[in-house]
Image (tube, helix red, strand yellow):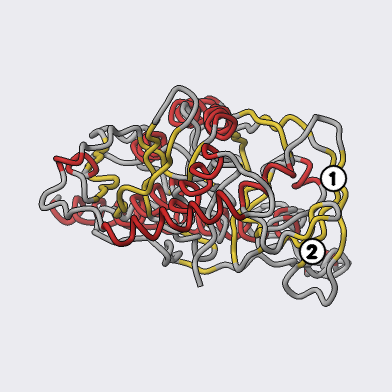
Amino acid sequence: MRAPSVTRSLLGAVLLSLPLASPAAVEDEPLLPLDELRTFADVYNQIRVGYVEEIDDSTLLEYAIQGMLMSLDPHSVYLTKDAFEDLQSNTSGEFSGLGLEVGMEDGYVKIIAPIDGSPAAEAGLLSGDVILKLDDNPVKGMSLADSIEIMRGPKGSEIVLTIGRPGESQPFEVTLVRDTIKVASVRQRILEPGYGYIRIAQFQTHTGEDVGEALQKLRAEGELDGLVLDLRNNPGGVLRSSVDVADLFMDGGLVVYTEGRLANSDMRYEARAVDASEGIPIVVLINGGSASASEIVAGALQDHGRAVIMGTNSFGKGSVQTVLPISESRAVKLTTALYFTPNGRSIQASGIAPDIVVERARVEAYDTSRQLSEADLSGHLENANGEASHERSTVNGLLSSDNQLYEALTLLKGVNILGMRDRQKQQRNARTAAASDS
C-alpha cells in the first residue's frame, strides 16, 4: 500500500529550490525508447480523433504530463498556475479553504491533520479520517488535485463532507464553512512555573526565527527548567526552517543530509555551535500527523541525544521535493532526493519511532477530594518540624485535556528532580572530601 501524500493543496513537502541538471549532466543517459514513443503517439492520436468529446492538443498533453508525474510517487506533481500560487501562499502561512492536510490512499482522500484553529479543527475532524464524499460527489476515483479544488471556494461558502472514521460503524456528514486560513506557525506558553511549551503548526519560511523569539519570551517569564516542543499534526514545510529550528536546541553537529541522483541534490546541513536553549531538558511530542520537516527536527534531536521523543510513530515522509519552474506560470514539483538523520536513518515509509510511546487517550482522574488524611482527623498531632499541612493540589487539567502533554510535563519534572538530587549528592561528597582533607 502506498503511503498517502502529505499535502494541503500542495503543502507538506520538504521543499528545496534547486536547479535541474541538464540531460548532459546525467552519465550514460540511454537513448529514448522509440517503440514506446510510437505507442504513446498512437494512443494520443486515438484519443485525439476518437474520444467522445473533442479535446484540444494542449489539454491532452497537459493530462499526459500530469499522469506521468502522478505515477512516480505521491509527492511529484505538475503545478498549474493556480497550484503554483497556492504552494507559494501556503508556505507563507495564509490560504483559503477548510484547513486540512490531506493525502490520497486507496483512491480516497485521507486526512493527515486539521490545521489549528481552522473550520476542520473546530468541526472535530481527526487525523486518519477518510473523506468519502464532497457534497454529492463521490471521492473514489477522483484525483487529489480535483478533490482539493472542490474543497476550495469563496470564504463563507458551505461544503458537506461525508466522513468515514476508523472504529465507527457508519459514515457521518460534517458541514464546514470555508474561511481564510491564517496558520500561526508558532505559539508558546508557560505550562507551570519553570516549564515552557512551544507548538509548531507547520514549517514556514520564518519559523526558525519565530521559535527563537518564542524561546526568548518564555525565558522572560522566568528561568526554564524544561521545554515541551510540540510537533504533533505538523505536516512539514520548508526544509531550511526545520534546520533552523533544530539549530536552536543543538550545540553543533549534523542536522540532516540528503542524497539524490543529481550532484546538487546531495546536501548536508549543520547546526551552529551555540545552543540557544542552553541545554535545558526537552521533550518532543510527535504522532502520525508529524511529517517531513517535523521528522527532520525530531530525528536530529533524537540522534544527538538532545531530547526525549514521546508520542506515537511519525508519518514517514523522508523524500525531498524540488520545485522546478518550466514557465512563468507553471512548474513541476519533483522528488529529487531522500533525507537522512545524522545517524544515517532513512525515515521514508518508516517514520520516527518515539523513545517513549504514549498513545493519545481520554483519561479521567478519580475524585479524591473527599478522601481523609491524618490532617483531617480531630485532635491530630502537629508536624514535628512545625510545617503546616499542605492543601491537596487539584489534578492537573492536562491529564484530561491532553494526556500526552501531561506525560511530557511529568517526565520533565522527573528529570529535574533526579538532576537536583544528583547535584546535591555531588555537593555532599565534595563537603565530605573537604572535611577528610582537613
Q: Residue at x 74, y 44 (%)?
A: 150
Q: As rendered, which of 9 and 34 lies closer to the eye?
A: 34
Single out the residue that lies furthest toward the left.
28
Left or right relative to 338: residue 328? right
**In which quadrant of the rendered view does residue 72 lie?**
bottom left
- Residue 433: x and y, percent? 19, 55
| Vertical placement of residue 245 versus 367, above or below | above
Q: Position of residue 386 (x, y in %)?
A: 67, 52
- Find the distance from the CA under tag 1 to the CA under tag 2: 59 Å
Residue named by callout 1: 159
Which three-letter amino acid code belongs to the residue tagged 2?
Answer: Ala
Residue 389 lies, in percent from the top left, at: 73, 56
Tell me the number on the disc at residue 375.
2
Lower sequence index among marks 1 and 2: 1
Q: Quadrant for residue 266, please give it.
A: top left
Does residue 197 appear in the picture of this structure? no
Task: Residue 93: give its label.
Answer: none
Is 91 located above or below residue 27 in the figure? Answer: above
In the image, taking residue 415 as reference, residue 251 lies left or right, namely left
